[in-house]
Amino acid sequence: MRKTTWILMVALAFGLAACDDGAPADGDAGPGDAGSSGFENADCDDFDTANCVRVEGGDAQGLLDAVNTIDSDTTIVLGAGTFELSNQVTIRGVNTLNLVGQGMDETILAFTSATSQINGVDVIADGFLVQDLTVLDAPKDGIRVEDSDGVTFRRIKATWSEPGLSTNGAYGIYPVRSLNVLVEDSVAERSSDAGLYVGQCINVVVRNNIVRENVAGLEIENTQYADVYGNLAENNTAGIVAFDLPGNPVVGRDVRLRDNMILNNNHENFAPGGTVALIPPGTGTFALASRRIEITGNTYTGNQTGDIAVLSGLAIEEASVWELETSTLVGDWEDLGLLEGATPGTVTNFRTENVVISGNTHTDGGLAPEPHGDFGVLIRVLFTEDPVPSVIYDSIGEEFSTDPTMHTNVNRICVGGNTGGTGVASLDVPSQLLSPMSPILVVADAPFAPFDCTTIEGDPIVVPTF
């Protein structure tokens, strides 16, 4: 049962409007009352925390004062309106905290006038919920939650006023180095790196979100046990991707990308730099330096460079960069069979292995590959007239043969059981790098030997449920 403790003195001291268990203060209308001043869709009664603070819509200083004075186990309810902020909303030293607005179109935290490189909402707090609001024009990241356990992003939007600007912030919705993360029913758009970026997290569900007009729509990076489903990725440079980057102590594993719509991701690449600046427009999905990943039941339409690419980490960095000291690793990795590095006491995570791509539907993909970056140029050279095959594999780590029946599949890449599309190609990228004008590749016919499998090897993928 809800136990409400008033922090009336704090509220009065900072001009905040406090609320109680359904008894509105004099002059305030209650929740749901059409005459209330901007708290029609959410109010204190809707949340089971010990404390609750109301902040009137537009009271930016009231919001900053509230987050600077709150105790643990508190809900901050923001009224409808635009909060013009030049300082980031920073939350530290408290746990079990809800930050709730009246809806994505009703409560807007606007950082348009900020002159320093700040995030919008920046949080370290276990048990954090952010819901029903928009963060607009954050100079860096929109909503960043770091080193926290139990994080929920629900019905929020992170966006920038102008599309396609390299000066837009890097990440819209950004949980990083956190445990037990849920992102649902939200929108991320126009970021100069990734709209919705899950980095170095463990136990993640990302569902029913919209990502559009970003360089990368939705990224799962160095993350363990992630279920990504029901999302729409449209008009990004790249739609939904999963990868490891070198040097991070969480080795990615058990990622499922399923039942998503990945449509027309042909937006110009406007990243100011970094790895995503290399992505050619028109990319649906890529898995890079990934293991134990399923890409199933997705709908791919109109991605003009190609629908799915499977790439080794060696395509972007040499092996030594991928060495990880085993004493620094966190999470589960011992059963992954990672290759030992050249330095004693290290393993490497550059291999992409044990990938299942099955049950997807492909339409009108790979018809106009964009020669952007080394990979885009390579694809353009290889497929000058024919459509790019729906799945392309760089073949790094394989014994390549132009006879498909002699080609190895030691990395266990499975591409059986997809619908539509233009087949599967294994590229001999090591040879391409030596002689890029003499392309060598295998475009396999169905059933795509030696890749005609449809199930993950070993135990089933493990993902959390929320």
Image (tube, helix red, strand yellow):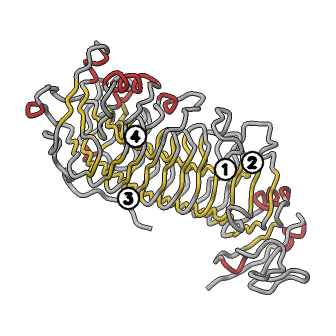
Quadrant in which the C terminus is drawn:
bottom left
> Which residue lies at the image location 81% right of the left edge and 56% below the top edge?
83
Does the image show residue 419? yes
Tell me if mark 1 has few (under 14), some (14-19) or many (20+) residues whose alpha carbon lies within 10 angstroms of its own. Answer: some
Tell me if mark 4 has few (under 14), some (14-19) or many (20+) residues whose alpha carbon lies within 10 angstroms of its own. Answer: many
Q: Position of residue 425 (x, y in %)?
A: 24, 34
Q: Position of residue 347 (x, y in %)?
A: 31, 33
SS at mark 4 in the image: strand
Front residue of 255/238: it is 238
Q: Earlier in the sequence, mark 1 or mark 2?
A: 2
Q: Position of residue 182 (x, y in %)?
A: 50, 61
Q: Type of residue at label 1?
A: Asp
Q: Earlier in the sequence, mark 1 or mark 3?
A: 1
Q: Earlier in the sequence, mark 1 or mark 4?
A: 1
Relative to 121, 16 lies left or right: right
Give me the C-alpha separation between circle 2 and circle 3: 36 Å
Q: Earlier in the sequence, mark 2 or mark 4?
A: 2
Numbered disc in front, either 2 or 3: 3
In contact (CB < 8 Å): disc 4 and disc 3: no
Does the image show residue 348? no
Q: Type of residue at label 3?
A: Asp
Give residue 122's mark: 1
